[in-house]
Amino acid sequence: PLKRGQSFPFQRVFMLTNLRRVIFSTPGKIVALLLLVALGVGFAMMDVQNLGLGGASSSGALVQVGDKKLTEQELQDRLRNALERVRQQQPMLDMAQFVRTGGFDQVLNQVIDGMALEEYAAQQGMAVSPAAIDGQIASIPAFQGFDGKFSQQRFDQLLSEQRLTAEQVRSDIRRETLVQWLMAPIANPGPVPAELATPYASLMLERRKGSVGYVPIGAIAPGTPPTGAEIQAYYQKNSGRYTLPERRVVRYAVVTPAQFEAGAKATDAEIAAEYKKNAAQYAATTRRNLAQIIVANEAAAKGIAAKVNAGTSMADAAKAAGLQASTLQNAEKAA
């Protein structure tokens, strides 16, 4: 609202009115349209420039966590490798479809999470030794030869196919190992034994005071070096700490009868020669079941035989004589 003694700004109203008349006129509409097109082209050029840079900073890094950097080329390689793994199940999938279905975000977030956990592990003093990394590489079956041992040629061949370097593989293994160390206790928490939980719980119920004195290591006598016998005795007592688990490599071949059918067909002449060579093996035989009674003398045998011939069964005749009949099954006799 106007105050007393204040004049109304007629000049400003007149200028706005003239500007509106110019804009809504035909020449004004053309000029305004050209200005809008120029602004749109300018913004589009800025977007194209940012897209060409891939959002990377002047240092060439898309993401930086601590001293670890994710470059545009590394992200492209990881996207390509992830797409190739998915193509094993979906051969018709292309990069555009992979990105639309969230593949880009998944790969990027996975790398960023790994870099963040790796940086956190480094801040906590955690590290993976090169020997442990080499041991994991050697234990991967894809990098092993026919003898079950690590093959440098196979290793280089697979890395070349995947467009990876040995340093990238070692870096990924180092990162995955640290992530596993950090996340495994959280992902699979187990019950805490009472013997372990009780001392920690008791710390909140007690308060202690103490003093600390600094004693340099040089002021402590080194002591007597252990003898060979003492070292050997300690080793035998704690041999389990210095024993590696046994590992064996088993090589086997799957053999089926169908693989030998073609070469195992014998001719009539070969069959006749084999039969003639082992005629005794293929000779005709007779098989009989024999019942017998073993007696001490001939007189007893004749007495039992007379009863059997008279119609008494061998079992009853043997039982009457205080004996027992036995039977021989499938007794063979050459024909």
Image: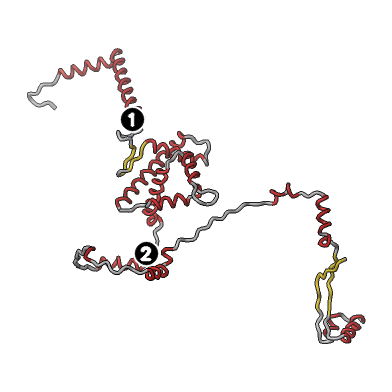
Q: Which residue is mark 2?
A: 192
Residue nearest the viewer, comparing 69 with 335: 335
Residue sticking out furthest to the top: 27
Where residue 126 sits: x, y (%)? 33, 53
Residue nearest the viewer, comparing 83 with 300: 300
Residue nearest the viewer, comparing 107 with 264: 264
The answer to whether 161 is drawn above or below residue 135 in the figure is above
Where residue 194 sits: x, y (%)? 36, 68
Q: Is residue 189 left or right of residue 207?
A: right
Mark 2 closeness class: few <14, some 14–19, many ≥20 residues within 10 Å? few
Q: Quadrant of residue 3?
A: top left
Image quarter (top left, top right, bottom left or bottom right) of the C terminus: bottom right
Where residue 302 sits: x, y (%)? 90, 84
**Total marks drawn?**
2
Choose the circle earlier in sequence order: 2 or 1: 1
User: What label sits on residue 50 in the rendered view?
Assistant: 1
Q: Is residue 249 left or right of residue 65?
A: right
Where residue 275 sits: x, y (%)? 82, 56
Task: Find out whether the residues at labels 2 and 1 contact each other: C-beta distance under 8 Å.
Answer: no
Mark 1 closeness class: few <14, some 14–19, many ≥20 residues within 10 Å? few
**Could you give the CA–CA distance between mark 2 and mark 1, rounded to whole angstroms?**
53 Å
The answer to whether 326 is drawn above or below residue 109 in the figure is below
User: What label sits on residue 203 in the rendered view?
Assistant: none
Residue at 53% in and 48% down = 145
Residue nearest the viewer, comparing 7 with 204: 204
The answer to whether 290 is drawn above or below residue 18 in the figure is below
The amino acid beneath tag 1 is Asn
Q: Quadrant of residue 241?
A: bottom left
Q: Is residue 152 left or right of residue 195?
A: right
Secondary structure under tag 2 reads loop
Image quarter (top left, top right, bottom left or bottom right) of the N terminus: top left
The amino acid beneath tag 2 is Val
